[in-house]
Image: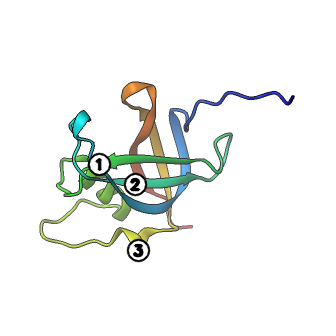
Amino acid sequence: MAFLTVSSGGVAVGNYTGTFTGIEATQPKPEKGYGAGIRWKFQIDAGTCAGQTTSRVTGCAPTPKNGCGKMLSGLIGRALKEGEQIDPDTFIGKRYMIVVAAGRDGGTRVEAIVPMPAA
């Protein structure tokens, strides 16, 4: 029998470079008090976590102060303007500096993203 290697089950807390791979809708979890949401997904580009996906789930309506707005602001690299419409799919494949922090229940989540400087 082959040995089994235990993993953390996710990307460890730290700073990474990664690529935005898109968003997907999440289902409501009334038993936990969550409504429908958006999962923001990134693939880590280098290091021991290369190839792994890390993400963050937010609500669906962005404001300058909530998680959805902070993720959207990070994607575009500037503050949001009231009334503007932004298609997150236009940022798929772009690279970002990604801060992964401890989340609830012992997991991790994307805390912040910053566009990579132009080369």
Residue appearing at x 18%, y 53% in the figure = 64
Residue type for callout 3: Thr
Instruction: Point out the tag, 1 or 3, that comes first from the N-terminus.
Output: 1
Q: Label for residue 40?
A: 2
Q: Residue beneath label 1, please?
A: 58
How crowded pointer 1 is (Cα within 10 Å; few <14, some 14-19, many 20+) is rated as many
76 relative position to 12: left or right? left
Give coordinates of residue 52: x percent, y percent: 60, 47
Residue appearing at x 32%, y 72% in the figure = 87
Please tell me whether residue 3 is drawn above or below residue 112 in the rendered image: above
How crowded pointer 3 is (Cα within 10 Å; few <14, some 14-19, many 20+) is rated as few
Q: Secondary structure at mark 2?
A: strand
How crowded pointer 2 is (Cα within 10 Å; few <14, some 14-19, many 20+) is rated as many
Q: Label for residue 90?
A: 3
Instruction: Point out the tag, 3 or 2, that comes first from the N-terminus.
Output: 2
Residue type for callout 2: Trp
**Spatial CA span between label 1 and label 2:** 8 Å
